Amino acid sequence: MKLAADPQSKGRGVLIAMNDMINGARDTTKTDTTNVATFMSPELGAFGFIASGHNYFVRQTTKRHTSGSEFDVSKLDSLPRVDIVYSHSNADRVPIDAFVKAGAKGIIMAGTGDGSVHEWEEPGIVDATKKGVIVIRSSRVPNGPVTESLQRYADEGMLQSGTLNPQKSRVLLQLALTKTNDPKKIQEYFEEY
């Protein structure tokens, strides 16, 4: 409660205070299945810490969030369908085709390394993007951004998630799809949020 009431918290977005650490929701992930000290920001670090009943901030995000967001879901009953496909050795297009057939408006590819996807998945991705499905490359790796690594990924219509993991990429894509289906604008959202 002290964190929420602290004037220093204003403008920092959603904060998570656990185990004397202050983390920003965008950068926080669960790091252990059972440990109570599980919520951490392993890549960029905590926003601050709590000691002797006082909040100490050491950083803040430069990304848009919460009250600075242009997304408003207050009048929506649901968000567009966005599914996650995990890429792995010998992965193929079957799950991509199934999600497109089920009505997916977007697909997050949880790739290896820098968001790499298996070559057997790529024909399904190309067909999905031709049908207007937005495909975002993300990574199963916990740290590091997904970048514009291969020109063929851009040629196939895939966008990149930056530092968002597959789960958070899914949420941002759902929000983005409430505004637009334009890949260029959606990529801007992933750079901005």
Image (tube, rainbow, N blue to C red):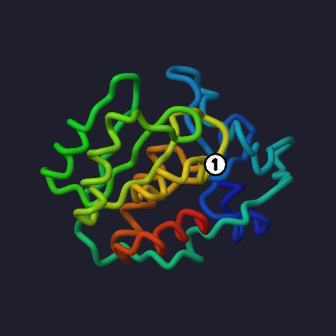
Q: Residue at horizontal 48%, vertical 51%?
A: 152
114 lies left or right of 122? right
Residue 132 percent across, percent down from the top left: 27, 66
Report the front residue among 139 and 130. Answer: 130
Q: Residue at horizontal 50%, vertical 38%?
A: 116
Q: Is residue 15 above or below residue 49?
A: below
Q: Quadrant of the C terminus?
A: bottom right
Residue 190 percent across, percent down from the top left: 54, 63
Name the amino acid type tagged 1. Answer: Asp
Q: Is residue 36 above or below residue 182?
A: above
Q: Quadrant of residue 50?
A: top right
Q: Is residue 172 above or below residue 180?
A: above
154 lies left or right of 128? right
Classify mark 1: residues with Cα within 10 Å, few (<14), some (14-19) or many (20+).
many
Q: Residue at horizontal 45%, vertical 60%?
A: 172
Report the front residue among 10 and 130. Answer: 130
Residue 107 percent across, percent down from the top left: 33, 51
Q: Quadrant of the N terminus?
A: bottom right
Residue at the disc numbered 1: 27
Q: Residue at horizontal 60%, vertical 48%?
A: 149
160 lies left or right of 108? right
